[in-house]
């Protein structure tokens, strides 16, 4: 089992790329290849990826990532079987799916709820008309004041 946080954002020279099947200067991609090559058949890997959706978390220097952010993980992880149940933010992908996509690891969350806009064209027109009326009213007030 490999648990790791990839080194993001680095660039590697051509010399560093020679031992890898997929040649790239991106450090994280070379490191990922190293991890894959290090796994034994049937081995498992957990990786922190830079593209997973954390948009509702405000992680900054003054508000750092804390152990509490991992409470959901610890609730869903069974250490006796090394199984992790899927959640809104985490999921397992069979190696066959990764191979079929030519090892493209874009983090497209299959569990994410869609933010689809269900408003009808009529609803949108009503909103636009309402806002246009509000803007026209504000402009009238400004014009009366000579602005």
Image (tube, grey):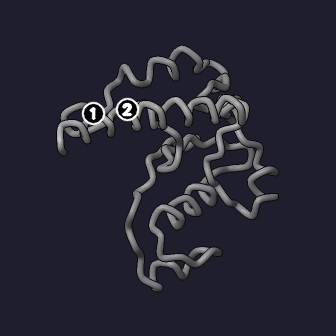
Residue where numbered disc 2 is placed:
137
Find residue 60 and report its horizontal and vertical position in percent.
26, 38
Query: Which numbered circle lies on residue 4?
Result: none
In percent of width and height, residue 9 lies at 39, 63
Q: Among all residues in the image, which is located at the extreme top?
A: 75
Q: In x, y percent, where is residue 119?
A: 68, 29
- Give the crowd class for mark 1: few <14, some 14-19, many >=20 residues within 10 Å: few
Splitting the image into 4 quarters, where does residue 86 fall? top right
When the figure is inspected, residue 146 is found, relative to residue 138, above or below; the finding is below
Residue at screen point 38% across, 67% down: 10
Residues 13 and 113: in front is 113
Residue closer to the observer: 109 or 8: 109
User: Percent x, y for residue 118?
Assistant: 70, 29
Quadrant of the frame with the N terminus? top right
Closest to the observer: 64 or 81?
64
At x 44%, y 24%, the residue is 70
Name the residue: 63% across, 24% down: 87
Quarter location, residue 105: bottom right
Up/down of 100 relative to 62, above or below: below
Residue position for label 1: 141
User: Quarter holding the C terminus?
Assistant: top left
Tell me whether the residue at label 1 lies in contact with that at label 2, contact meaning CB atoms closer than 8 angstroms.
yes
């Amino acid at each position: 089992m490999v648990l790791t946080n990839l080194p993001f954002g680095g660039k590697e020279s051509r010399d560093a790329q020679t031992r890898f099947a997929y040649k790239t200067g991106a450090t994280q991609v070379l490191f990922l290849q190293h991890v894959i090559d290090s796994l034994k058949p049937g081995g498992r890997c957990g990786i922190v990826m830079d593209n997973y959706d954390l948009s509702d978390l405000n992680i900054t220097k003054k508000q750092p990532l804390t152990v509490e952010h991992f409470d959901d993980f610890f609730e869903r992880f069974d250490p006796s079987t090394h199984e992790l149940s899927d959640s809104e933010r985490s999921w397992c992908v069979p190696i066959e799916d990764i191979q079929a996509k030519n090892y493209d690891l874009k983090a497209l969350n299959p569990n994410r709820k869609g933010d689809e806009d269900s408003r009808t064209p009529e609803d949108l027109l009503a909103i636009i008309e309402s806002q246009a009326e509000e803007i026209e009213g504000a402009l009238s007030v400004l014009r009366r004041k000579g602005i």
